[in-house]
Image (cartoon, rainbow, N blue to C red):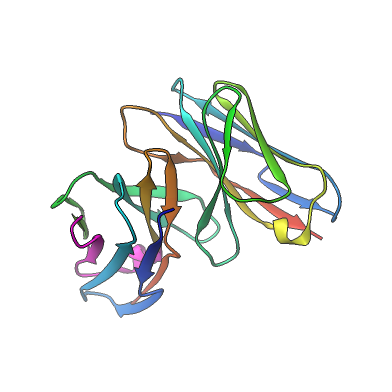
Amino acid sequence: SQTIHQWPATLVQPVGSPLSLECTVEGTSNPNLYWYRQAAGRGLQLLFYSVGIGQISSEVPQNLSASRPQDRQFILSSKKLLLSDSGFYLCASRTAPSHEQYFGPGTRLTVT
Amino acid sequence: ELKVEQNPLFLSMQEGKNYTIYCNYSTTSDRLYWYRQDPGKSLESLFVLLSNGAVKQEGRLMASLDTKARLSTLHITAAVHDLSATYFCAGLYNFNKFYFGSGTKLNVKP
């Protein structure tokens, strides 16, 4: 089975600072990768997904961006954080032909 | 876009009782998923439902899918305190995009 790593686990950043969150996947190849955000007490919002290296689809207009420089690496970035960017960021992976989507442990971001 | 609605959003129940969480979705979904989330933790996959009439069971949880009604249910039998968590359903749209419901926060009281 696949394992998803995310770091850092927690992050406190001031408004206007940059952001880089990293996700790596072990135990599979050619996964579909996903970034989600979960606000406190809410459901998950799909931010980006990627079906291959360099291929990024954005679901929600915002000041975040994503990149996939390697097959099993997915990065979420921002040039200038907003207060509204606070939340729990989850990376997920899905590999054909399995129908399962596996989640990483998440990064809790607080923007102050 | 796929809209997914869960109800109830909050559920407080006694141990030993049965209850059902409902998940309605707005348009054709390729798959229907159920997840569990404990406080402060990530999501754990419970069930993947692939086709109309699919039923899956694990312990005290049973999930079903009715694609004609665009409805999935998660039935809890003889609840125990360890089932206290937030449960999410999610639909897969266009084979790549997942859309989640708002979650049902379940509290099982001893």
Residue A26 magenta-drawn? no
Q: Tell me which corner region of the image, top left, top right, bottom left or bottom right, holds residue A102.
A: top left
Q: Is residue B22 above or below residue B94?
A: below
Give x and y (percent) for residue B86.
Answer: 42, 64
Q: Tell me which corner region of the image, top left, top right, bottom left or bottom right, holds residue B8.
A: bottom left
Q: How many numbered badges does the structure rendering display?
A: 0
Give x and y (percent) for residue A54.
Answer: 61, 24
Residue B74 magenta-drawn? yes
Q: Left or right: where does residue B96 sit relative to residue A36? A: left
Question: Residue at coordinates 32% horizontally, 36% vertically from top-left?
Answer: A99
Question: Residue at coordinates 40% horizontally, 55% vertically from top-left?
Answer: B2
Write the start and end of the magenta stretch as one range: B67-86
Give x and y (percent) for residue B56.
Answer: 18, 50
Q: Nearer the viewer, residue B80 or B55?
A: B55
Q: Left or right: where does residue A26 sit relative to residue B71? A: right
Question: Residue at coordinates 46% horizontally, 27% vertically from top-left?
Answer: A31
Give x and y (percent) for residue B72.
Answer: 25, 60
Question: Residue at coordinates 86% horizontally, 52% vertically from top-left?
Answer: A16
Q: Nearer the viewer, residue A101 or A27?
A: A101
- In this view, the residue farthest toward the left is B53
Q: Quarter of the image containing the C terminus of chain B?
A: bottom left
